[in-house]
Amino acid sequence: MNFIVRNINQLCKKERKKKGSVLLRIRKFLLFILLFVTGCFCLYLYGEKNHYLREVADKRNFLIGASVSASPFLHDDKYKTILKNEFNLLTIENDMKFSRIHPQRNTYDFSLPDLMVNFAEENDMKVRGHTLVWHHSNPDWLSKEKYSKEELSLILKNHIQTVVKHYGGKIYAWDVVNEAFNDDGTLRNNIWLQTIGPEYIELAFRWAHDADPNALLFYNDYSNEGINQKSNAIFRMLEDFMKRGVPIDGVGFQMHSDIMSPKDEEKIKENINRYKLIGLEVHITELDIAIQNSDKPYKKRLQQQAEMYSKILDVCLLYSNCTAMVTWGVTDKYSWIPEYSGQPDAPLLFDRDYEQKLSYKSIYGKLKK
Protein backbone atom coordinates (compact mmCIF):
# COMPACT_ATOMS: atom_id res chain seq x y z
CA MET A 1 0.00 0.00 0.00
CA ASN A 2 2.85 2.43 0.85
CA PHE A 3 4.55 1.57 -2.46
CA ILE A 4 1.40 2.51 -4.41
CA VAL A 5 0.96 5.81 -2.55
CA ARG A 6 4.64 6.75 -3.09
CA ASN A 7 4.42 6.11 -6.82
CA ILE A 8 1.26 8.15 -7.16
CA ASN A 9 2.86 11.02 -5.25
CA GLN A 10 5.94 10.92 -7.48
CA LEU A 11 3.79 11.11 -10.57
CA CYS A 12 1.85 14.00 -9.06
CA LYS A 13 5.07 15.95 -8.43
CA LYS A 14 6.10 15.61 -12.07
CA GLU A 15 2.75 16.88 -13.22
CA ARG A 16 2.83 19.99 -11.01
CA LYS A 17 5.08 21.63 -13.60
CA LYS A 18 2.28 21.38 -16.11
CA LYS A 19 -0.21 24.08 -15.15
CA GLY A 20 -3.80 23.04 -15.33
CA SER A 21 -2.89 19.46 -16.10
CA VAL A 22 -6.01 17.33 -16.22
CA LEU A 23 -3.91 14.26 -15.54
CA LEU A 24 -2.67 15.73 -12.26
CA ARG A 25 -6.21 16.36 -11.04
CA ILE A 26 -7.27 12.86 -12.03
CA ARG A 27 -4.37 11.29 -10.16
CA LYS A 28 -5.07 13.34 -7.04
CA PHE A 29 -8.67 12.20 -7.18
CA LEU A 30 -7.59 8.56 -7.54
CA LEU A 31 -5.25 8.96 -4.58
CA PHE A 32 -8.11 10.29 -2.45
CA ILE A 33 -10.36 7.38 -3.45
CA LEU A 34 -7.60 4.88 -2.71
CA LEU A 35 -6.96 6.26 0.77
CA PHE A 36 -10.68 6.46 1.53
CA VAL A 37 -11.34 2.85 0.49
CA THR A 38 -8.28 1.64 2.41
CA GLY A 39 -9.48 3.38 5.57
CA CYS A 40 -12.95 1.92 5.25
CA PHE A 41 -11.52 -1.56 4.71
CA CYS A 42 -9.30 -1.29 7.80
CA LEU A 43 -12.23 -0.13 9.90
CA TYR A 44 -14.27 -3.08 8.66
CA LEU A 45 -11.43 -5.52 9.24
CA TYR A 46 -10.35 -4.43 12.70
CA GLY A 47 -13.46 -2.77 14.08
CA GLU A 48 -13.54 0.28 16.29
CA LYS A 49 -10.38 1.02 18.21
CA ASN A 50 -12.12 1.12 21.58
CA HIS A 51 -15.44 -0.31 22.59
CA TYR A 52 -16.80 -0.96 26.05
CA LEU A 53 -19.41 -3.21 27.60
CA ARG A 54 -21.13 -0.36 29.38
CA GLU A 55 -21.73 1.53 26.13
CA VAL A 56 -23.78 -1.27 24.60
CA ALA A 57 -25.39 -2.10 27.96
CA ASP A 58 -26.50 1.52 28.44
CA LYS A 59 -28.25 1.46 25.07
CA ARG A 60 -30.28 -1.52 26.33
CA ASN A 61 -30.93 0.11 29.72
CA PHE A 62 -29.12 -2.91 31.19
CA LEU A 63 -26.64 -3.02 34.06
CA ILE A 64 -23.37 -4.86 33.46
CA GLY A 65 -21.18 -4.98 36.52
CA ALA A 66 -18.22 -6.44 38.36
CA SER A 67 -17.26 -6.86 41.97
CA VAL A 68 -14.35 -4.77 43.22
CA SER A 69 -11.66 -6.08 45.57
CA ALA A 70 -9.64 -3.85 47.90
CA SER A 71 -6.03 -4.66 47.01
CA PRO A 72 -6.18 -4.12 43.24
CA PHE A 73 -8.52 -1.18 43.71
CA LEU A 74 -5.93 0.55 45.88
CA HIS A 75 -2.77 -0.47 44.02
CA ASP A 76 -3.52 -1.35 40.39
CA ASP A 77 -4.39 1.57 38.10
CA LYS A 78 -5.05 -0.66 35.10
CA TYR A 79 -7.63 -2.57 37.13
CA LYS A 80 -9.43 0.66 37.99
CA THR A 81 -9.28 1.86 34.39
CA ILE A 82 -10.95 -1.28 33.10
CA LEU A 83 -13.48 -1.15 35.91
CA LYS A 84 -14.65 2.37 35.09
CA ASN A 85 -14.47 1.98 31.30
CA GLU A 86 -16.26 -1.34 31.01
CA PHE A 87 -18.91 -1.45 33.73
CA ASN A 88 -21.86 0.69 34.76
CA LEU A 89 -22.45 -1.24 38.00
CA LEU A 90 -20.06 -1.98 40.87
CA THR A 91 -20.45 -4.47 43.73
CA ILE A 92 -18.18 -4.09 46.74
CA GLU A 93 -16.91 -7.65 47.11
CA ASN A 94 -15.88 -7.88 50.77
CA ASP A 95 -15.45 -4.48 52.35
CA MET A 96 -19.08 -3.88 53.31
CA LYS A 97 -19.39 -7.20 55.12
CA PHE A 98 -20.07 -7.09 58.86
CA SER A 99 -16.54 -7.90 60.06
CA ARG A 100 -14.91 -5.30 57.79
CA ILE A 101 -17.28 -2.39 58.26
CA HIS A 102 -18.23 -2.99 61.93
CA PRO A 103 -15.06 -4.45 63.51
CA GLN A 104 -15.91 -3.46 67.11
CA ARG A 105 -19.32 -3.22 68.73
CA ASN A 106 -19.22 0.56 68.88
CA THR A 107 -16.86 1.17 65.95
CA TYR A 108 -17.60 1.40 62.22
CA ASP A 109 -14.97 1.71 59.52
CA PHE A 110 -16.36 3.17 56.30
CA SER A 111 -13.03 4.37 54.93
CA LEU A 112 -12.45 1.79 52.19
CA PRO A 113 -16.04 1.34 50.99
CA ASP A 114 -16.36 5.14 50.95
CA LEU A 115 -13.48 5.28 48.45
CA MET A 116 -15.19 2.69 46.27
CA VAL A 117 -18.58 4.37 46.40
CA ASN A 118 -17.00 7.73 45.57
CA PHE A 119 -15.14 6.13 42.66
CA ALA A 120 -18.44 4.77 41.35
CA GLU A 121 -20.15 8.15 41.65
CA GLU A 122 -17.27 9.90 39.86
CA ASN A 123 -17.57 7.45 36.97
CA ASP A 124 -21.35 7.33 36.69
CA MET A 125 -21.63 3.79 38.04
CA LYS A 126 -24.38 2.38 40.23
CA VAL A 127 -23.42 0.45 43.37
CA ARG A 128 -24.75 -2.79 44.84
CA GLY A 129 -24.17 -2.96 48.60
CA HIS A 130 -23.05 -6.44 49.69
CA THR A 131 -24.11 -7.64 52.26
CA LEU A 132 -25.94 -6.63 55.44
CA VAL A 133 -26.77 -10.04 56.96
CA TRP A 134 -24.80 -13.26 56.43
CA HIS A 135 -23.67 -16.29 58.39
CA HIS A 136 -20.04 -15.66 57.34
CA SER A 137 -17.75 -12.69 57.90
CA ASN A 138 -19.15 -11.74 61.27
CA PRO A 139 -16.72 -10.07 63.72
CA ASP A 140 -15.28 -11.92 66.70
CA TRP A 141 -17.02 -9.62 69.15
CA LEU A 142 -20.33 -10.80 67.72
CA SER A 143 -19.56 -14.49 67.25
CA LYS A 144 -17.91 -15.17 70.61
CA GLU A 145 -20.53 -13.61 72.87
CA LYS A 146 -23.93 -14.92 73.94
CA TYR A 147 -26.85 -12.56 73.42
CA SER A 148 -30.54 -12.67 74.20
CA LYS A 149 -33.04 -12.36 71.36
CA GLU A 150 -33.69 -8.74 72.25
CA GLU A 151 -29.97 -7.88 72.46
CA LEU A 152 -29.05 -9.49 69.15
CA SER A 153 -32.09 -7.99 67.43
CA LEU A 154 -30.99 -4.54 68.56
CA ILE A 155 -27.40 -5.18 67.42
CA LEU A 156 -28.58 -6.28 63.98
CA LYS A 157 -31.05 -3.41 63.63
CA ASN A 158 -28.41 -0.85 64.60
CA HIS A 159 -25.89 -2.39 62.23
CA ILE A 160 -28.25 -2.40 59.26
CA GLN A 161 -29.58 1.07 59.83
CA THR A 162 -26.20 2.64 60.58
CA VAL A 163 -24.67 1.23 57.39
CA VAL A 164 -27.66 1.90 55.14
CA LYS A 165 -28.11 5.46 56.43
CA HIS A 166 -24.41 6.18 55.99
CA TYR A 167 -24.82 5.42 52.27
CA GLY A 168 -28.30 6.88 51.96
CA GLY A 169 -29.02 7.79 48.32
CA LYS A 170 -25.70 6.33 47.12
CA ILE A 171 -26.49 2.62 46.95
CA TYR A 172 -28.67 1.46 44.06
CA ALA A 173 -29.44 -1.94 45.58
CA TRP A 174 -28.61 -3.84 48.76
CA ASP A 175 -28.11 -7.56 49.21
CA VAL A 176 -29.93 -7.37 52.52
CA VAL A 177 -29.76 -11.06 53.45
CA ASN A 178 -27.27 -13.48 51.90
CA GLU A 179 -27.39 -17.29 51.76
CA ALA A 180 -29.98 -17.94 54.46
CA PHE A 181 -31.14 -21.29 52.99
CA ASN A 182 -29.66 -24.76 52.78
CA ASP A 183 -29.84 -26.74 49.55
CA ASP A 184 -32.78 -28.78 50.87
CA GLY A 185 -34.87 -25.63 51.35
CA THR A 186 -34.52 -25.39 55.12
CA LEU A 187 -33.18 -22.28 56.82
CA ARG A 188 -29.46 -22.27 57.58
CA ASN A 189 -28.74 -22.76 61.29
CA ASN A 190 -26.78 -19.54 61.87
CA ILE A 191 -26.44 -17.10 64.77
CA TRP A 192 -29.41 -15.08 63.55
CA LEU A 193 -31.79 -18.02 63.26
CA GLN A 194 -30.64 -19.56 66.54
CA THR A 195 -31.15 -16.41 68.59
CA ILE A 196 -33.73 -14.25 66.82
CA GLY A 197 -35.65 -16.91 64.93
CA PRO A 198 -36.78 -17.10 61.27
CA GLU A 199 -38.28 -13.64 61.45
CA TYR A 200 -34.77 -12.14 61.33
CA ILE A 201 -34.99 -12.14 57.51
CA GLU A 202 -38.19 -10.12 57.38
CA LEU A 203 -36.98 -7.77 60.09
CA ALA A 204 -33.75 -7.12 58.18
CA PHE A 205 -35.68 -6.01 55.10
CA ARG A 206 -37.96 -3.76 57.14
CA TRP A 207 -35.04 -2.13 58.94
CA ALA A 208 -33.14 -1.58 55.68
CA HIS A 209 -36.19 -0.02 54.03
CA ASP A 210 -36.75 2.31 56.97
CA ALA A 211 -33.13 3.48 56.70
CA ASP A 212 -33.29 4.19 52.93
CA PRO A 213 -36.75 3.87 51.34
CA ASN A 214 -35.34 4.52 47.85
CA ALA A 215 -32.77 1.71 47.73
CA LEU A 216 -33.73 -1.56 46.05
CA LEU A 217 -33.65 -4.52 48.45
CA PHE A 218 -32.58 -8.01 47.35
CA TYR A 219 -32.35 -11.48 48.80
CA ASN A 220 -29.17 -13.16 47.43
CA ASP A 221 -28.16 -16.83 47.27
CA TYR A 222 -26.34 -19.52 45.28
CA SER A 223 -27.78 -22.60 43.52
CA ASN A 224 -31.13 -20.83 43.33
CA GLU A 225 -31.21 -19.91 39.64
CA GLY A 226 -33.02 -23.07 38.53
CA ILE A 227 -35.94 -25.00 39.97
CA ASN A 228 -35.05 -27.06 43.03
CA GLN A 229 -35.87 -27.39 46.73
CA LYS A 230 -33.82 -24.35 47.64
CA SER A 231 -35.13 -22.05 44.93
CA ASN A 232 -38.70 -23.13 45.65
CA ALA A 233 -38.30 -22.29 49.35
CA ILE A 234 -36.81 -18.89 48.51
CA PHE A 235 -39.59 -18.16 46.04
CA ARG A 236 -42.28 -19.07 48.59
CA MET A 237 -40.70 -16.75 51.15
CA LEU A 238 -40.45 -13.81 48.73
CA GLU A 239 -43.94 -14.41 47.38
CA ASP A 240 -45.18 -14.29 50.95
CA PHE A 241 -43.26 -11.05 51.52
CA MET A 242 -44.95 -9.51 48.50
CA LYS A 243 -48.40 -10.55 49.71
CA ARG A 244 -47.82 -9.13 53.19
CA GLY A 245 -46.13 -5.91 52.12
CA VAL A 246 -42.65 -6.74 53.39
CA PRO A 247 -40.30 -4.41 51.45
CA ILE A 248 -38.53 -6.53 48.82
CA ASP A 249 -37.57 -5.63 45.26
CA GLY A 250 -35.75 -8.60 43.88
CA VAL A 251 -33.72 -11.78 44.12
CA GLY A 252 -30.07 -12.33 43.35
CA PHE A 253 -28.85 -15.43 41.54
CA GLN A 254 -25.13 -15.73 42.34
CA MET A 255 -24.41 -18.28 39.59
CA HIS A 256 -20.84 -19.27 40.40
CA SER A 257 -20.42 -21.79 37.60
CA ASP A 258 -18.16 -24.36 35.93
CA ILE A 259 -17.94 -25.46 32.30
CA MET A 260 -18.30 -29.06 33.47
CA SER A 261 -21.74 -28.29 34.92
CA PRO A 262 -23.79 -26.43 32.29
CA LYS A 263 -26.83 -24.54 33.51
CA ASP A 264 -30.34 -25.72 32.66
CA GLU A 265 -31.52 -22.77 30.60
CA GLU A 266 -35.17 -23.79 30.60
CA LYS A 267 -35.26 -24.03 34.39
CA ILE A 268 -33.62 -20.62 34.71
CA LYS A 269 -36.22 -19.16 32.35
CA GLU A 270 -39.01 -20.73 34.38
CA ASN A 271 -37.59 -19.28 37.58
CA ILE A 272 -37.04 -15.76 36.22
CA ASN A 273 -40.53 -15.78 34.78
CA ARG A 274 -42.21 -16.73 38.04
CA TYR A 275 -40.49 -13.80 39.73
CA LYS A 276 -41.69 -11.58 36.91
CA LEU A 277 -45.25 -12.70 37.55
CA ILE A 278 -45.11 -11.55 41.18
CA GLY A 279 -43.36 -8.27 40.34
CA LEU A 280 -39.78 -8.93 41.46
CA GLU A 281 -36.53 -8.12 39.67
CA VAL A 282 -33.74 -10.62 39.10
CA HIS A 283 -30.03 -9.76 39.23
CA ILE A 284 -27.29 -12.20 38.32
CA THR A 285 -25.01 -11.13 41.13
CA GLU A 286 -21.78 -13.16 41.33
CA LEU A 287 -21.19 -14.78 37.96
CA ASP A 288 -17.94 -16.52 37.14
CA ILE A 289 -17.28 -19.69 35.15
CA ALA A 290 -14.39 -21.92 36.22
CA ILE A 291 -12.59 -23.93 33.54
CA GLN A 292 -9.87 -25.85 35.40
CA ASN A 293 -11.81 -29.06 36.09
CA SER A 294 -11.98 -29.98 32.41
CA ASP A 295 -9.29 -32.05 30.67
CA LYS A 296 -10.01 -30.49 27.29
CA PRO A 297 -7.42 -28.28 25.55
CA TYR A 298 -7.19 -24.79 27.03
CA LYS A 299 -8.55 -23.02 23.93
CA LYS A 300 -11.53 -25.37 23.87
CA ARG A 301 -12.23 -24.62 27.53
CA LEU A 302 -12.17 -20.89 26.83
CA GLN A 303 -14.58 -21.42 23.97
CA GLN A 304 -16.96 -23.38 26.21
CA GLN A 305 -16.72 -20.68 28.83
CA ALA A 306 -17.61 -18.00 26.29
CA GLU A 307 -20.61 -20.01 25.14
CA MET A 308 -21.83 -20.37 28.73
CA TYR A 309 -21.48 -16.66 29.44
CA SER A 310 -23.38 -15.88 26.26
CA LYS A 311 -26.22 -18.31 27.03
CA ILE A 312 -26.65 -17.03 30.59
CA LEU A 313 -26.84 -13.43 29.41
CA ASP A 314 -29.15 -14.43 26.57
CA VAL A 315 -31.61 -15.97 29.05
CA CYS A 316 -31.50 -12.87 31.23
CA LEU A 317 -32.13 -10.53 28.31
CA LEU A 318 -35.30 -12.43 27.39
CA TYR A 319 -37.04 -11.07 30.50
CA SER A 320 -37.70 -7.44 31.31
CA ASN A 321 -37.33 -8.12 35.05
CA CYS A 322 -33.78 -9.49 34.66
CA THR A 323 -32.03 -6.13 34.79
CA ALA A 324 -28.41 -6.72 35.80
CA MET A 325 -25.50 -9.12 35.45
CA VAL A 326 -22.41 -8.85 37.67
CA THR A 327 -19.22 -10.88 37.28
CA TRP A 328 -17.48 -11.77 40.53
CA GLY A 329 -14.30 -9.93 39.71
CA VAL A 330 -12.72 -8.11 36.79
CA THR A 331 -9.66 -10.14 35.80
CA ASP A 332 -8.44 -13.71 36.30
CA LYS A 333 -5.43 -12.17 38.06
CA TYR A 334 -7.50 -11.43 41.18
CA SER A 335 -10.23 -14.07 41.10
CA TRP A 336 -11.18 -15.69 44.41
CA ILE A 337 -11.41 -19.18 42.85
CA PRO A 338 -7.69 -20.20 42.78
CA GLU A 339 -7.33 -19.43 46.48
CA TYR A 340 -10.54 -21.32 47.25
CA SER A 341 -9.84 -24.37 45.04
CA GLY A 342 -6.08 -24.49 45.45
CA GLN A 343 -5.42 -24.57 41.72
CA PRO A 344 -5.07 -21.93 38.98
CA ASP A 345 -8.16 -20.96 37.02
CA ALA A 346 -9.43 -18.39 34.55
CA PRO A 347 -13.11 -17.71 35.32
CA LEU A 348 -13.58 -14.06 34.26
CA LEU A 349 -13.83 -11.83 31.18
CA PHE A 350 -10.26 -10.50 31.25
CA ASP A 351 -7.15 -12.66 31.50
CA ARG A 352 -4.24 -12.10 33.87
CA ASP A 353 -2.71 -9.60 31.44
CA TYR A 354 -6.00 -7.67 31.17
CA GLU A 355 -6.62 -8.88 27.63
CA GLN A 356 -10.21 -9.42 26.56
CA LYS A 357 -11.07 -13.12 26.44
CA LEU A 358 -13.54 -14.90 24.18
CA SER A 359 -16.02 -14.60 27.04
CA TYR A 360 -15.74 -10.81 26.94
CA LYS A 361 -16.33 -10.80 23.20
CA SER A 362 -19.34 -13.08 23.53
CA ILE A 363 -20.91 -10.77 26.14
CA TYR A 364 -20.17 -7.67 24.09
CA GLY A 365 -21.63 -9.24 20.97
CA LYS A 366 -24.78 -10.30 22.79
CA LEU A 367 -25.32 -6.85 24.30
CA LYS A 368 -24.69 -5.14 20.97
CA LYS A 369 -27.43 -7.04 19.13
Image: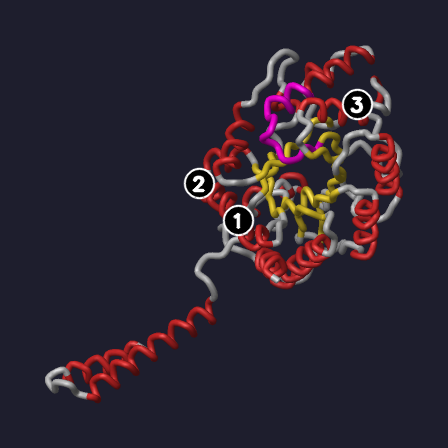
The answer to which image quadrant residue 308 occupies is: bottom right
Please, what is the three-letter code of the amino acid marked with disc 1? Glu
> Magenta stretch: residue 164 in it?
yes
Tag nearer the camera, 3 or 1: 3
Please state which of residues 145 and 120 is positioned toward the viewer in this rendering: 120
Tag nearer the camera, 2 or 1: 1
Residue 155 image offset from top left, x and y in percent = 72, 15
Please, what is the three-letter code of the amino acid marked with disc 3? Leu
Residue occupying image coordinates x 68% and y 42%: 285
Q: Alpha carbon of mark 2 to alpha carbon of mark 1: how far?
A: 14 Å
Residue 345 image offset from top left, x and y in percent = 62, 49
- Residue range in magenta is 160-175
Which residue is outermost to the front?
Answer: 20
The quadrant the C terminus occupies is bottom right
Residue 332 image offset from top left, x and y in percent = 57, 47
- Provide the residue designation for mark 2: 77
- Is residue 205 toward the left or the right of residue 336 in the image? right
257 is higher (above) or lower (below) than 200: below
> Magenta stretch: residue 243 in it?
no
- Provide the residue designation for mark 1: 86
| Residue 203: assigned label | 3
Please, what is the three-letter code of the amino acid marked with disc 2? Asp
Residue occupying image coordinates x 60% and y 22%: 166
Q: Earlier in the sequence, mark 2 or mark 1?
A: 2
The answer to which image quadrant residue 367 occupies is: bottom right
Q: Earlier in the sequence, mark 3 or mark 1?
A: 1
Q: Secondary structure at mark 2?
A: helix
Q: Secondary structure at mark 3?
A: helix
224 is higher (above) or lower (below) than 3: above
| Residue 4: assigned label | none
Q: Alpha carbon of mark 3 to alpha carbon of mark 1: how far?
A: 36 Å
Q: Alpha carbon of mark 3 to alpha carbon of mark 2: how far?
A: 40 Å
